[in-house]
Image (cartoon, rainbow, N blue to C red):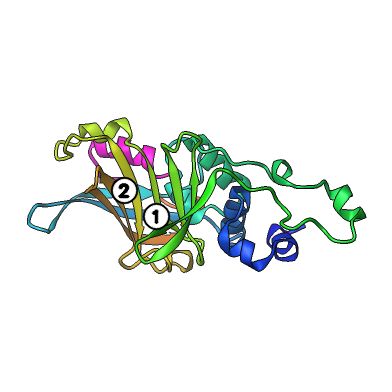
Amino acid sequence: MNIGLLLSIFLPLSALAQLVPGFYLYTHMAEQRGKAALPALVLSVSRPQSSGTEETLGTLSLNNWKPRSDGWPTLSLLFANEPDFLISAVQSFGIAVAKEQELLRASREQVAAMKEPPRPFYKPDRAMSMKRLRKTYAWVHSSADKSKSIWIERDTFLPLKIAAPCPEAVGDLSWAKSGDNQCEIEFRNISGLAQGRFQNARIALWKDGSPVLFFSFERISPARAGAAPTESKLSGTLQELAEVLLH
């Protein structure tokens, strides 16, 4: 049975508005994208300047981007359209996703024999919480030790940010100040990406409360088999960092 339909039948509206299980969160995100072809992407990479301007550092071309299970699940949260791929990316990042069977209050057979199903249908997912972020509310899915978290906007199911200890390559950025080594990926102006509208859409990397890198979408197009590859133009450090962050 479709998970969205299952929850709409068995979960009271008030409960659904308060908290959802992690498996449902990612399944819904992937399923609502349909089976559209995964995109080819071109992003420009820049860093902030003290004057308030930005310095362009190069371009990153992802000609045949596909979800992977190593690194931060940044692009997977935006484009993955297979629930298993997205859940695998999240788990490989270090945040466990409880399976539906683990959260059921009763087996399917038991439910079939009941006059009314249990309400709520699922046990609480202890990895999930809801928090306020900026001017909205977010589903927050956290690792057991709370060191890593993924924030998804409550109503739109669009990613808001990812928080975790910084990748090692961040330490090689000469302009990144020393600190607690806590990083965040912030998603900005991404509501139109699924429809190919990428104007002003970007991914910002923050370290210890200060922005250090911006990945701005310059082109989104369907990946084409046999198309001539476009080369990235980035330094080795930035290429290494992009390979960790953009999965």
Magenta: predominant secondary structure element?
Answer: helix
Q: Which of 5 and 105 is in front in this view?
A: 105
Q: Quadrant of residue 127?
A: top right
Q: Is residue 105 left or right of residue 116?
A: left
Answer whether residue 236 is visible to the viewer in this image: no
Q: What element carries label 1?
A: strand
Check disc 1 and give the amino acid type: Leu
- Tell me the element at label 2: strand
Check residue 156 for magenta coloring. no
Which label number is shown at residue 97?
none
> Label 2: how many residues lie within 10 Å, few (<14), some (14-19) or many (20+)?
many
Residue for point 27% across, 35% down? 181
Q: In this view, does 96 lie above or below 227?
A: above
Q: Is residue 203 left or right of residue 108?
A: left
Query: Mark 1 vs mark 2: which is more N-terminal?
Result: 1
Coordinates of residue 110 in the picture (x, y in percent): 88, 49
Q: What stretch is highlighted in magenta?
A: 232-247
Amino acid, disc 2: Leu
Q: Give coordinates of residue 63: x percent, y percent.
A: 42, 50
Name the image quarter holding the N terminus: bottom right
Q: Answer yes or no: do the residues labelled 1 and 2 have beta carbons within 8 Å?
A: yes
* Residue 230 higher or lower than 6, as above or below: above
Q: Residue at x 84, y 49 (%)?
A: 108
Which mark is on residue 60?
Answer: 2
Q: Can residue 4 be spotted in the picture?
A: yes
Look at mark 1 in the image and give the residue it sits on. 41
> Could you tell me residue 97's position as x and y percent?
59, 41
State the residue at coordinates (30%, 45%). 232
